[in-house]
Amino acid sequence: MKKICALTMVRNDEFYLRKWVAYYGKELGMENLYVYLDGKDQEIPDWCPGVNVTAVDKIPGQVVEAEKGRLDFLSGRAADLLKKYDLVIGVDADEFLVVDPRLGISLSEYLTKADIKVSVSGLGVDVGQHTGEEGDIRSDDTFLNQRHYARLSTRYTKPCVIAKPVRWGRGFHRIKGHNFHIGKDLYLFHFGYFDLGRIKARFDDPSRRAAGWTKHLERRSKTIRQVTEGKARNWDRTTRFARVLQTVCRPPYALNKPAMMELVLIVRIPERFRELV
């Protein structure tokens, strides 16, 4: 088996970090998780024994500047980790790299079998809340047992698994000087905007407002509207189509990122995923 680790950076985000640690700890082992707390004012959590948690100097600047600094930092840490690991997974705390359960293998087994030259991406799945059917998210159940709809999103088709040192662009969305490759039956589920109540709470967070996040949060909340109002398509057919389309189409301003011709593809997530995250 390949040696695989995962890293992330968070600030005041225990809700997602708990889920992130539980998921990747089960898939990779707690000792292979690396969590960086953005700011030495953050307390080291006592609920994740074995995880490598480090508080670092807060990344300075507004959204764009701070995000660049964050990914420069994480790219450097990933390069160091690749001295003792075969692969590094770099994702935000609300993102979960998932293998289709019908394969019957774990994430580490999938990545061990995969021929990864530089990187591999999961197909981006931006999970929303169907406000006509789904209530507030609860912590006593899996996310995917409470949320059943998503938009297939180029934004979350990220080169998040790397086999050699690279420079990630902001948000892990691309790697400088390299193409991306979407793994078959591999998905990146994003849960950052899957609950209307949590989005409103983020609007009220003074530190996020001060850092210029208000417009970003408002823009991202459209996922909820789209999954509520849109017609949900068949998962298997639509993900196959989206994977091909995102592989072929590129935005003219960034040829190493996927595009999908502005299509809004809403899908219903199959029951086989419900117990995974």
Image (spheres, rainbow, N blue to C red):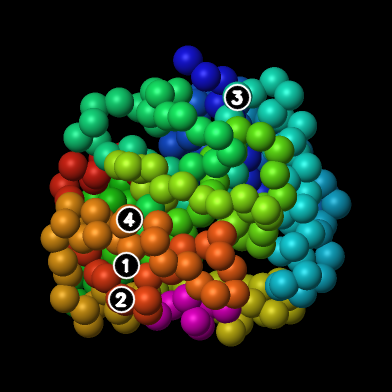
- From the image, tell me which residue sits under label 4: 243
The answer to which of marks 2 and 4 sits earlier in the sequence is: 4
At which x and y percent is residue 14?
A: 57, 50
SS at mark 3 in the image: loop
Q: Amino acid at mark 2?
A: Val
The residue mark sitting in front, 3 or 4, is 4
Give the mark nearer the N terminus: 1 vs 3. 3
Q: Which residues are magenta?
A: 216-222
Q: CA distance from mark 2 to mark 1?
A: 7 Å
Q: CA distance from mark 1 to mark 3?
A: 32 Å
Q: Is residue 143 above or below residue 44?
A: below
Q: Name the residue beneath numbered marker 3.
A: 86
Whether residue 255 sits left or right of residue 193 in the image: it is: right
Residue 87 disc label:
none
Comes first in the chain, label 2 or label 1:
1
Residue 264 - label: 2
Q: Is residue 117 left or right of 183 when viewed as pictured? A: right
Residue 11 inside the magenta-drawn segment = no
- Asked whether, in this view, residue 86 is left or right of residue 20, the answer is right
Identify the secondary structure beneath mark 1. Answer: strand
- First-in-chain label (1 vs 4): 1
Q: Tell whether label 1 touches label 2 (CB within 8 Å).
A: yes
Question: Which numbered disc flags the more N-terminal residue, 3 or 4?
Answer: 3
Quadrant of residue 247 in the image? bottom left
Q: Neighbour class for label 3 at 10 Å: few (<14), some, many (≥20)?
A: some
Q: Secondary structure at mark 2?
A: loop
